[in-house]
Image: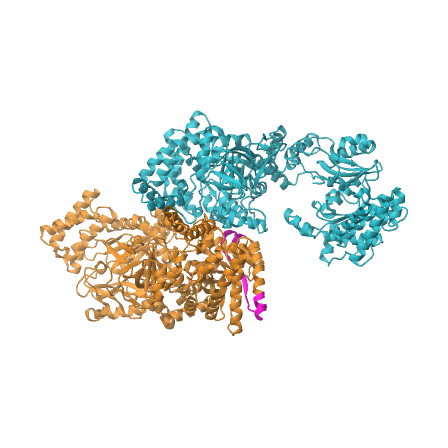
Chain colours: A orange, B cyan
């Protein structure tokens, strides 16, 4: 006969799947000698059977419940329905995963017309006993029989009105007796039966009610939201009732074994004298700090202090527990792993290791990588009063205040003048880069989490609130409005990119926490992880920041961002507009020293760590004014009849822009295709890289340039370019009389590249998965279009569980990565494979990269710590070496 | 010791790789008793060794050459350098694949100062002997020693001037002796040595020269162009010289065993009396038809007639051969499989089967599928005089004449009025569909082989010349110019889409050939092939045409083309502009009866064959005016200060178009994404399909509607839509009280769909590979952009061997197809898989589809015969059951 019922003490904390979280921990606490009110758990298997078999109990369950009940009666000396010493129990759900408040609970079960008198005698408190009974009838009627709660409430109000009292607590025993009579009549009217007097009957029906509540609407919704499988089922806990509301020697409370906000090891918690658990939760009375218990309930407090130590040491993780004191005696009702802030999670992990409770690897798994984000950006000091104007998407964390400006050039000018600015745009384009760079933060009214503004801001580690539709921008008037509030250029606002808030005025922020504990924990992570962590950085400042955060190199240095600087745009445009190769070369000659200087600065900062430089990638028209803009200008001139060189120039520019215009620029003339058509551009870039590297090497600075050719889809592309560019590299070495350890590789960002990775690896010395573009093409989603047009709908309606631009789509994009790595290494076993898409800074994706066998991930500087931690956790998860946290 | 030298008769026609085409067939002809001048072949392996070993001969080669030479001397009774009976040989290249004129030949080898006298004696013709010698010195000097040919020509001219003669043939023996002296002096001056007198030395150096000519520039270029591997090498044929120029009992000629133009079995060929082979080729004298030989050279003609029969019967394919008659004796110098027109290839294949020479399967392989294209479109009668104005890309075959018009509406109006028009546009867009439909042919000045115009024209089987840059279109003036020639609206032009020509005026065309032989051959193909052939058709007319060509169903019926009809555009636009679902539904209600009528017409034509209807696919903005156009209109109104409802309307329209505007529409809101966001659109379509099907079924017409959901990339997309649409389908069945065998499937056109095909096949009842889009996304090529911007460069420079939009890229796109089919069938073993991209009508791609295991291909109506033939050849090639054509 299968075992469905576990008496407390028969199970342990590891049996959460079978006994649910609550049941497993009640058993565990019983075993280690903590004062748990006696009881037993019906396993989730019984619930699963119940659903699989037309809502019937499995064979043996009834018998096992009966035997456990017999044991409970024996141990407590109480018995069901005993008019002298009645057994009262609670019947509670308890799923393997926490689903707080989603399922049903029945308290005070076992009361009937006789037992209530016994309870009254026993407690010498008639009022208390009647109140328990009327609550039980109401709960049972509501939860088990579906009698509407309001109908009970109406009757209660009637009696209160009759007695001319306002509060439930003002009703005396006599009045409560009247309530009980009315409740029973209501129950009969609604259900067609008398209120059940047999406690065993009450219990059986309550157990079924808990089973049924697994499939109530709110539970289903919650499971969907939290991705809890429907098939798990819930356990049912039947436990002796204890009462914290039996006078001033009773009470109830919650505690944390460490401070969940700071992580400090101290007695942390709250309690209420003469109250039940729900009173603490309901917040009707203000609970007192736990230390006050030393005065109010000194003996119980001594017991509780021991419990703190036992729980913390036994579970080896911070516990969040509930307790009740009944007439001076302490009872433990629940314990579970406590939620905590990111700062606390780090401190607790590090402290516990120091205390010898857990090992370093376990400590490393105790911090959620994504929590680190909170710690690395300034935060708004929430103790001050703030006026939140609007909420948008939390696109890039951190808080920033500044003067509003609507124009990138203006932002730059103000920034140069030492002013703090927030750049406010409907959306940003690559043309606005210098403005983004100069601004403290970005606010856009359009675009999603992966819009241009969001991506660039995250890359730069700047706060950004994106897609804030409530903000109505009027670019002509240079102002924006949120309902009645109008904010003009130059007014101060503050944005909090971590939560998406737009706040009026300047508000105080607190600097990011970079505690020693934090650094120590990451150093442990570094000991464990095998995958490298690099950064995506285009400037010396970003590179420096990334180094501070532990980056081991640059995985992606985008050279085109260097083209966007306003002092370079004229030369860049001249290069693009050139009709002849010679003109183009002349323009490139002007750009070369600038690029070289950029590279030297970055190489110098990176101190001999590898720097992966990507050759020019975006389509050339991104460096020119927009077609629409020009069209309006030219049409205006034409209609107005403006003549002369200005019009001619504009018309010519329009012609060029139109020639360069593409139906789908994403899939057009960009990446290595540019290099193949206009080799002089990439030759200039390689020359600049190599000259920078050679010059620094001569100065004694070690430089490792990895030159990355983007958008390769066919082996001939990299073959041709590599041959051409290696010649340039060798020539520079020859001219400078020195050698540097350069290499040529490619991004794998075109689906075909992954599919023919073996062919490409013949020429590529390294791969870097460009998962942004790879995701776009594998899904056929243009990020710019999809975010706003249908992706939100897909996510909202569960068509996609999460945006593939945030978390790597393992089935599709991930499959291509697997194929790419395998095929690539089949011809070049030591092929270095990395990732430089934004996924390189996302926890799940980093762990997937480890599984696929990548050598490194690369992410924006502010994500480097996250990646270090996630990379370590990936190893530990694979090894299975983490010490089980009993309640985690 | 490896055998490098094969005496004629030691090899056979199957040994082309080793002996080259010429050598293998000379051996074969010797074996079957045809009169081949004796000789031997040095194998390609010797050439390969030569190149792999620093241009040295393999061990044994010298010895084997010597032995063969001994045998040759013995057999002919002549010997090298014999002043009485000198042996003269030719040394010719002969590669495994025909490379006509690309490599070098040396004739009359063996002549020296003594032998020339012997030849003079033997032939009793001093002039002839000296002419042979001077030609040999020139050839040897040029080919072997690199002495410039012009230098020899100059000397010849000098002597002619001295003798005051004009033609070479006017030089007498004495003059030629002078030429020889001058040639030898020149040779010495240029090479520093005397002209070699030892024939063995001459020969060794000539063999090396032929080896070397394998790698001359023109041969390399030719190989690249014809994809002949460099590693093959060439064989060298050394053969007794025979002379067709030894008097009126001598001659030379070429013959075909069947008429290469019509395929009729007859003596076909030309010859010249008293001439050498090069005279026929050079075209200096006009050759006579072969039948005249009966009078001129009656005995040789009788022998030749026998050769005709022997060759045709022996090789079992039409032969193209060369012969020489020396003093009345016939010698065969070469035979190979003859090139032929498509009409001839069909007739020959069918006739040979009837004659019992080949079996049906072999006949099926004897016609190149792509040749069929020629037969299915009207052709220009090339016997008339035509004025070719310009050449563009041969985008869609066939010839058409009509009046020039520059506007789709105008084209339609003229078409409706019964006029023939050629639509001339810089490029076409979906807005022009009705104009394309009404026109006889399309001419564009921009866009490539897969531009919109090209694709649509091919789909409709209409002639199209695309990307004709010489044509400068002035839309305002309604005219185009090619240099000085200006063609105005209403002028007649003719286009030939098979060759890309634009011709001034109307010219006569010949109707397409649909011979009985053609039909018979295709019926044999049908017996062999296992893969179905369907068509892509959106109209009853196209469907009808496809049925006539043997289509077995519709593989792709695009419903949006039905939205493009001018009388429907208002309703379609209303539907798109609708703000509320109810408004959208109202607009859809108007469209529904139209769609239903369309489907009924098509279903009726298809007579119970499956019809795969694709639900709406393109982004909605394709149905609205262009953003640029509106921007200009609105700006103009604004600048002019126009006020009122017209401006307001335009501004609103601009706003909508801008809202719908996408950065990369290819990867935006289209396909099933539309259906998920606006289910009412696809619900209407399914209702229309099902009502049409049910109504016809009631009338007794069998209908099999396969409903295809486009652009699925995630299983949830098809899951949701299928559930929703199947409900609609069932409801229609219920309402109509009848059932039809409908099914729901999807296009596999997103890379991810192929990668997760197992998940998708849970819901999809069939797959159709949309290789157009799949290619775009797998390569990251936007077809519209890539063609004009870089794909031409890629093809020209050999980065891509062929456009992946024309021939399936087997390594990338093909790999995804393989994965898709395998994964799909892993969960649904009987999953029907087809292809409906344009590749379904391309030979190599059709064969690849067979290898991958597709159930059918679908292509435009005019490609159906091609696909039937290619599908049959795929089976035969896999079986290896074709009878080897000895010279093929």
Query: Position of B767 compared to B508: left or right?
Result: left
Whether residue B200 is visible to the viewer of this picture, yes or no, is: yes
Whether residue B835 is visible to the viewer of this picture, yes or no, is: no
The residue shown at (31%, 38%) is B582
Question: Residue B49 falls in which quadrant of the image?
Answer: bottom right
The residue shown at (25%, 53%) is A483
Comparing B737 with A207, the one in front is B737
Q: Position of residue A665 (x, y in %)?
A: 46, 51
Question: Residue A324 falls in which quadrant of the image?
Answer: bottom left
Comparing A646 with B86, the one in front is A646
Q: Position of residue B827 (x, y in %)?
A: 48, 44
Query: Position of B135 compared to B826: left or right?
Result: right
Quadrant position of the C terminus of chain B in the picture: top right
Comparing B419 with B712, the one in front is B419
Which residue is farthest top? B699
The question of residue A751 being in magenta is answered with yes
Q: Position of residue A165 (x, y in %)?
A: 10, 54
Q: Which residues are magenta?
A: A731-755
């Amino acid at each position: 006969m299968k075992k469905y019922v576990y008496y407390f003490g028969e199970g342990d904390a590891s049996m959460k799947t079978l006994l649910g979280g609550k049941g497993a921990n009640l058993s565990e606490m019983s075993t280690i000698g903590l004062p748990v009110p006696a009881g037993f758990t019906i396993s989730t298997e019984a619930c699963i059977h119940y659903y699989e078999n037309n809502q019937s109990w499995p064979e043996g369950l009834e018998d096992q419940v009966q035997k456990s009940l017999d044991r409970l009666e024996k141990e407590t000396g109480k018995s069901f329905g005993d008019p002298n010493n009645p057994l009262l129990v609670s019947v509670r759900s308890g799923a393997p995963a926490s689903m707080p408040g989603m399922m049903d609970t029945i308290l005070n079960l076992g009361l009937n017309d006789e037992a209530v008198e016994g309870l009254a005698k026993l407690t010498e408190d008639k009022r208390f006993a009647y109140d328990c009974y009327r609550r039980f009838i109401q709960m049972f009627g509501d939860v088990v029989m579906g009698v509407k709660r309001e109908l009970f409430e109406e009757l209660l109000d009637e009696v209160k009105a009759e007695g001319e009292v306002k509060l439930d607590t003002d009703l005396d025993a006599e009045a409560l007796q009247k309530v009980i009579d009315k409740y029973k009549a209501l129950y009969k009217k609604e259900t067609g039966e008398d209120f059940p007097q047999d406690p065993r009957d009450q219990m059986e029906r309550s157990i079924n009610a808990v089973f049924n509540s697994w499939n109530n609407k709110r539970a289903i919704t919650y499971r969907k939201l939290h991705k809890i499988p429907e098939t798990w089922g819930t356990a049912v806990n039947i436990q002796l009732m204890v009462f914290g509301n039996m006078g001033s020697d009773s009470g109830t409370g919650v505690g944390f074994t460490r401070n969940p906000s700071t992580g400090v090891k101290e007695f942390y918690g709250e309690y209420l004298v003469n109250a039940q658990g729900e009173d603490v939760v309901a917040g009707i009375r203000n609970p007192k700090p736990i230390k006050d218990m030393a005065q109010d309930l000194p003996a119980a407090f001594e017991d509780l202090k021991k419990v703190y130590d036992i729980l913390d040491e036994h579970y080896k993780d911070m516990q969040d527990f509930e307790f009740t004191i009944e007439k001076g005696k302490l009872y433990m009702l629940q314990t579970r792993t406590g939620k905590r802030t990111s700062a606390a999670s780090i401190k607790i992990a590090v402290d516990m290791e120091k205390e010898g409770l857990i090992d370093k690897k376990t400590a490393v798994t105790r911090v959620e990588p994504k929590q680190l984000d909170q710690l690395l950006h300034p935060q708004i000091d929430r103790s001050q009063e703030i006026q939140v104007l609007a909420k948008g998407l939390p696109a890039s964390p951190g808080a920033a205040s500044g003067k509003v400006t609507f124009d990138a050039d203006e932002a730059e000018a103000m920034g140069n003048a030492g002013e703090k600015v927030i750049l406010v745009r409907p959306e940003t384009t690559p043309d606005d880069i210098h403005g983004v760079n100069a601004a403290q933060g970005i606010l856009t009214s359009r675009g999603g989490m992966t819009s241009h503004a969001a991506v660039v801001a995250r890359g730069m580690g700047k706060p950004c609130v994106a897609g804030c539709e409530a903000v109505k921008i009027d670019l002509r008037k240079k102002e924006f409005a949120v309902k009645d509030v109008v904010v003009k250029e130059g007014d101060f606002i503050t944005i909090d990119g971590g939560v998406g808030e737009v706040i009026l005025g300047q508000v105080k922020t607190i600097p990011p926490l970079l505690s020693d504990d934090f650094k120590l924990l990451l150093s442990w992570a570094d000991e464990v992880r095998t995958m490298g962590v690099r950064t995506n950085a285009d400037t010396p400042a970003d590179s420096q920041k990334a180094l501070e955060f532990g980056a081991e190199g640059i995985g992606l240095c985008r050279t085109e961002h260097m083209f966007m600087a306003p002092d370079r745009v004229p030369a860049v445009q001249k290069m693009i507009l050139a009709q002849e190769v010679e003109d183009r070369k002349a323009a490139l000659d002007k750009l070369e020293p600038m690029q070289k200087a950029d590279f030297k600065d970055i190489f110098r900062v990176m101190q001999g760590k590898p720097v992966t430089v990507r050759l020019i990638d975006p389509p050339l028209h991104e460096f020119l004014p927009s077609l629409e803009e020009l069209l309006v200008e030219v049409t205006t001139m034409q209609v107005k009849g403006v003549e002369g060189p200005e019009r001619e120039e504009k018309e010519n520019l329009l012609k060029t822009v139109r020639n360069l215009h593409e139906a789908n620029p994403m899939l057009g003339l960009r990446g290595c295709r540019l290099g193949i058509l206009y080799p002089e551009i990439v030759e200039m870039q390689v020359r600049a890289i190599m000259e920078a590297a050679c010059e620094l090497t001569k100065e004694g600075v070690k430089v490792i340039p990895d030159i990355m050719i983007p958008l390769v889809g066919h082996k001939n592309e990299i073959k041709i370019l590599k041959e051409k560019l290696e010649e340039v590299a060798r020539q520079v070495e020859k001219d400078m009389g020195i050698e540097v350890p350069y290499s040529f590789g490619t991004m794998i960002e075109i689906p075909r590249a992954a599919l023919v990775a073996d062919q490409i690896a013949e020429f590529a010395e390294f791969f870097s998965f460009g998962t942004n573009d790879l995701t776009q093409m594998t899904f056929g989603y243009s990020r710019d279009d999809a975010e706003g047009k249908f992706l939100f709908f897909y996510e909202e309606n569960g068509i996609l569980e999460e945006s593939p631009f945030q978390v790597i789509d393992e089935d599709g994009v991930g499959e291509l990565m697997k194929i790419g790595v395998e095929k690539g290494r089949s011809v070049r076993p030591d092929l270095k494979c990395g990732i430089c898409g934004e996924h390189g800074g996302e926890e799940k994706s980093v762990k997937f990269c480890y599984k696929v066998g990548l050598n490194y991930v690369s992410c924006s500087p502010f994500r480097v710590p996250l990646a270090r931690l996630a990379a370590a956790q990936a190893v530990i998860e694979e090894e299975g070496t983490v010490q089980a946290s009993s309640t985690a």
